[in-house]
Amino acid sequence: MAKAKETVTPLMQQYNTIKAKYPGALLLFRVGDFYETFGEDAIKTANILGIVLTKRGTGPNGALELAGFPHHSLENYLSKLVRAGQRVAICDQLEDPKTTKTIVKRGVTELVTPGVAYNDNILSQKSNNYLAAVFFDKQTLGVAFCDISTGEFLVAQGNSEYIDKLLQGFRPTEVVFQKSKRQEFLNLFGDKFYTYTLDDWAFTNDYANEILTKHFEVNSLKGFGVDKLQSGIVAAGVVLYYLGETEHRNLQHISSISRLEEDRYMWLDRFTIRNLELVSTANDNGVTLFDVLDQTSTPMGARMLHKWIIMPLKELKPIQERLGMVEYLVNHDDLLQEFLSHIKPIGDLERLISKVGLQKAGPRELVQLKRALSHIDEVKNLAEKTGNQFLSVLASQLNPCLSIKEKLERELNQDPPALLIKGNVIADGIDDELDRLRKIAFGGKEYLVEIQKREAAVTGIPSLKISFNNVFGYYLEVTHTHKDKVPESWIRKQTLVNAERYITPELKEYEEQILGAEEKIQAIEIRLYGELMYQVAQYIKPIQLNAYLIAKLDVLLCFAQLAVKNHYVKPTLNNTKDLDIKGGRHPVIEKQLPIGQEYITNDVFLDNDNQQIIIITGPNMSGKSAILRQTALIVLMAQMGCFVPAKDVSFGLVDKIFTRVGASDNLSSGESTFMVEMNETASILNNISDRSLILLDEIGRGTSTYDGISIAWAIAEFLHEHPTARPKTLFATHYHELNELENTMSRIKNFNVTIKEMSNKVIFLRKLVPGGSEHSFGIHVAKMAGMPSKLINRANEILKRLEIDRTEGQSVKDSIKKVQNQAYQLQMFAIDDPVLVKIRDTLNNLDVNTLTPVEALLKLDEIQRLIKT
Ligand SMILES: Nc1ncnc2c1ncn2[C@@H]1O[C@H](COP(=O)(O)OP(=O)(O)OP(=O)(O)O)[C@@H](O)[C@H]1O
């Protein structure tokens, strides 16, 4: 017998057709009250969501896997799927199953990807969720960032270094780029981004211009000031194209596009962003500068703060404006408190108005919008009254959109359900038909009692009753006693033992009304709500401006609160090229010290003429890095417009901050990555100016002493002898040999972080003082790492010998011989134990002269391990 041919049901045929249109996406297929997934998708879904995987059918290809969940759990499950890195296509029923006899029409209504999300469950409140597009043009790279949840749309172009820096700072959750450039992308930006590639045809000028001008309803992009950025525009066009591809077509809230102006912001190279731990730390639970500074009251304020941190300003006027405003708020605490009381309830207005643009705002969100607008009105009034110039300008720009606010107040039930379909969203008194239907649907009982009373009075039948059954609906029941009083117009439907049942045209009409009322009510509410949303959408631009202004005020209020709480002071910015920090502190470390322990403050002074480069020596853990970082953080905070953790600070604007940290893992065969990068990034180094600040932390560490010193030496020389610029530099090192540089280079000065040595123990004083260090600190390091005291004692002996011999002019070779002889006398080595022999040989083979502290550490570790085995 021939094998039965497997039949594919019409439903599965429909599924397969839709699935094929969205390659790479996990398809959630709505069937009745469930979203179902099949095959591979089902296996993934069940895994990620921890739901049951079942199997259906036994065709020639085996059973088909199936996993599904109820439709009302969509939001919750969707966020889990997207967070797990899935692209999720949501396929809905496009018509009411009741109205069709054939298979229900279905289609994908949204494709949710990590970069294209506005669902509160997926987004994190305090950070933006950017989608980025990168365009590899011939010479330059174009980039665009868009956050669909806020409507922000930014564009830039430049070399790969600049684009990399932007990607580091904006940290998009998804990056799209040309299919043919996969390898280039990986080479330049690494594999840490969630990426998606698109066919190359979408990356053309003509296409981008067309899609952008159409979206913004303009003839040219000139008005946005982006028309010159041809590569950037292509990337921006791709963003819009991708949003369309993912079924996001209501994008009114993306109401403008702006250029990321490179010249307006301080340049922080990517190492600086990472090393200063501005917005993220190497380990997940570390504390960032953002964490310490974030005292904002709204999510949009927090997101703005985030941007201010990674993009400090470099123009005096706007910085001073911010600082001036913070000072004013610090001095007017009552006003500050009043502002705060109105800003908190404004909430996330920026994302809220975006949902209006996306046509996804629920009734409660519109009520919240109304509330936010009332508070904006209050903020405006408060700001107006102050007479402060900045606040007066703010007041004149804030627009409480009173007419739409009043409309929302009037037309919406002020305590509505979260979902429109639950009903009771539109207020009473707005639509006559709605009021009438509601009366019928919800006031049904009273209406029937009214009819009953009236008919009883008219007919003189006191026992008249109105009831309902499924056969003929509402009816009047008359006992046989009153049979003869029944009017002629009543239609008899049923005779019982002691009563008769009648219907009347009025009852029939009422019945029809009541049965259809609920559906009609829903239809009217949906229509009226849609109209209301449409009207609110006309206010997207002024409301977005409000959101921006409130976010800005929120950040300034946050700075003012920080100033008071953390004792920050107002920095003085000027046009000199000096940097003068008195009593500086590290804003993050000072917050983490154990209770009772005070942060030791430090002064740092740098200028172009005498003290361009400071070499800071000191043992590990003495606080060198802290001094470097706090210097950069103070500069950065000041240029954000924030007060700073110090006693007194004044400096000339800084245009760029570079950081390089030496560590054994980014050094190869004695060649510093910094040197490599110096060559690679010649274009940037050519742009180093007298206003740049450079932090070099333990460059050369991890190589052997001579290599390390040579590299560090070369870098210091490079920066000192740079033909066009004298960048201010802090150079932390444990190579006391570098102190020699001071003698030959006039603008290099030695400093050290003080310690006190007491009976072989080191106490950190953490004060930066002029002068170099006498010796290296390798043994001290070993001690801190918990090496056995026997070994430490021995190391100290060796060191002492070496130091004595050096002053007596003896060669290192002789010293080593001496200490080796000494070693043979130690009891520990007299035994013929193979482990001890091995230890002895290891020690014998050590060339102490070229040993770096880190190598010493590693050797000691090796020896310790030998003992333990
Ligand atoms: N001024 C200070 N006041 C109080 N504690 C400090 C101060 N500076 C640093 N510390 C503490 O000492 C720790 C080590 O400081 P830091 O990392 O700056 O040392 P380092 O000399 O750079 O060491 P390494 O060479 O190992 O990087 C910090 O994490 C902090 O807890």
Image (spheres, grey):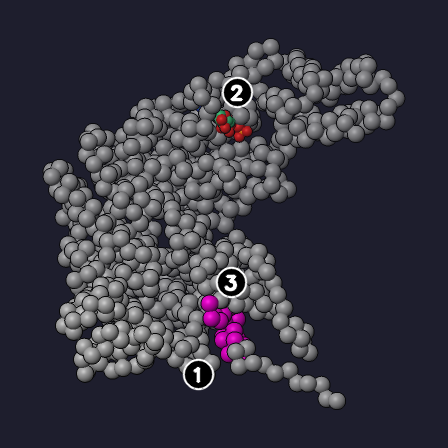
Q: Rounded to the nearest whole Å, what is the CA distance between mark 2 and mark 3?
A: 68 Å
Question: Within the image, what quadrant is residue 782 found in?
Answer: top right
How far across and how far down the image is residue 113, in percent?
46, 61
Looking at the image, tell me whether mark 3 or mark 1 is earlier in sequence order. 3
Task: Report the disc number at residue 584.
Answer: none
Taking the view exactly as shown, the residue that stands out farthest to the bottom is 1
The residue carrying mark 3 is 69
The label nearer to you, 3 versus 1, is 1
In the picture, which quadrant includes the C terminus? top right
Please say if the residues under marks 2 and 1 sit with CB atoms less than 8 Å apart.
no
The residue carrying mark 2 is 773
How far across and how far down the image is residue 32, in percent?
47, 71
Indicate whether residue 24 is drawn in magenta: yes
Front residue of 197/428: it is: 428
**Amino acid type, mark 2:** Ser
Q: Which element is circle 2 on? A: loop
- At x 17%, y 51%, the residue is 400
- At x 11%, y 39%, the residue is 385
**Amino acid type, mark 3:** Phe
- At x 57%, y 37%, the residue is 663
Q: Rounded to the nearest whole Å, what is the CA distance between mark 2 and mark 1?
A: 90 Å
Taking the view exactly as shown, the residue that stands out farthest to the right is 832
The label nearer to you, 2 versus 1, is 1
Q: Is mark 2 within 8 Å of ligand 1?
A: no
Front residue of 807/790: it is: 790
Please say if the residues under marks 3 and 1 sit with CB atoms less than 8 Å apart.
no
The residue carrying mark 1 is 101
Magenta residues, start to end: 13-33
604 lies above or below 384: above
